Image (cartoon, rainbow, N blue to C red):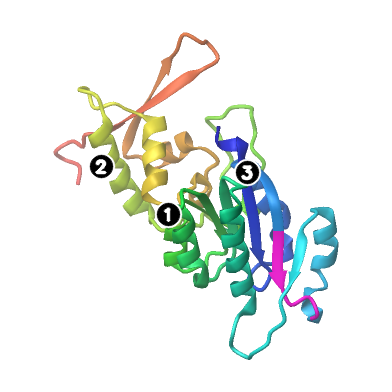
Amino acid sequence: MENDKRIAVLIDADNVSDKYIKYIFDEILNHGVPTYKRIYGDWTKPQMASWKRVLLDYSITPIQQYSYTTGKNATDSALIIDAMDILYSDNVDGFCIVSSDSDFTKLGARLREAGMYVIGMGEKKTPKPFIASCEKFKYLEVLAAAPAESYEGTEKMEKQEVPKEGMASKKELIEAIKTIVTESSDEDGWAFLGEVGKRLNKRYSDFDTRNYGHSKLTPLISSLKEFEIQQRKTSNRHIIHYFIKNKVKNKNQK
């Protein structure tokens, strides 16, 4: 199961604020169990003092890296070396690399080549090559802004104040969904929503309904106004499956 994965969490303190730490670990628990928890930086610098309480509260091991040469990032090198050591220890199923730095692009690709499940987390400024090198990528601003999920009326999920979007704009997202529905639909044009979501995740590593202001896929699809949604009961009265279909526009519609 996905949430049984053993995940090594490696944090670049030079590129991440301590205010995000709660959201980082809350999100990791949706994917697996954090085993290694390490954070890299020059802890002799005064600006790193705010991390002290956070490291204790979350039992994160700080790794000291002095800045030996101006312009050279020793933190990146230490994190990459540790990641490869952990990879070859064969003690984990995946990695979570927390940084907004493109220097970890090759690392993400290499870990995936080795069969690792790779999650990236960073701010919206994160370069696309690093985002694309991860199997999943989560924006820290979105994780911090996401409202607590309500289990009362899942059809009426709260919206975030400012949707962030991601690698795909809403227009691109609509076209991608239309293509996926066409490719995976039955003879009547209906496609299983779960399969559509799975293919979107494979197509866009940073796909997350929260990027577009919704907590779930169903209300996001509904908000796009381009698709019909159908509920189908199953043998289990507590489980309902959702199917979607591309809307057919009238000749008078542009």
Give the mark, 2 or 3, whose residue is nearer the N terminus.
3
Q: Amino acid at mark 2?
A: Thr
**In the image, is 218 to the left or to the right of 172?**
right
Q: How many neighbours does mark 1 have within 10 angstroms: few (below 14), some (14-19), or many (20 or more)? A: few
Q: Residue at x 69, y 53 (%)?
A: 36
Q: What residue does disc 3 label? A: 6
Q: Measured from the top left, where is residue 178 in percent x and y? A: 27, 41
Q: Residue at x 78, y 74 (%)?
A: 48
Mark sitting on residue 113:
1
Q: Residue at x 51, y 72 (%)?
A: 103
User: What secondary structure is found at the residue carrying circle 3?
Assistant: strand
Q: Measured from the top left, where is residue 9 in percent x and y? A: 65, 55
Total labels drawn: 3
Farthest residue, direction top: 235
Q: Measured from the top left, where is residue 177 in percent x and y? A: 32, 42
As rendered, which of 181 and 138 lies closer to the eye? 138
Give the mark, 1 or 2, whose residue is nearer the N terminus.
1
Magenta span contains residue 39: yes
Q: Is residue 215 above or below residue 132?
A: above
User: What secondary structure is found at the residue carrying circle 2?
Assistant: helix
Q: Which residues are magenta?
A: 38-44
Q: What residue does disc 2 label? A: 179
**In the image, is 142 to the left or to the right of 108?**
right
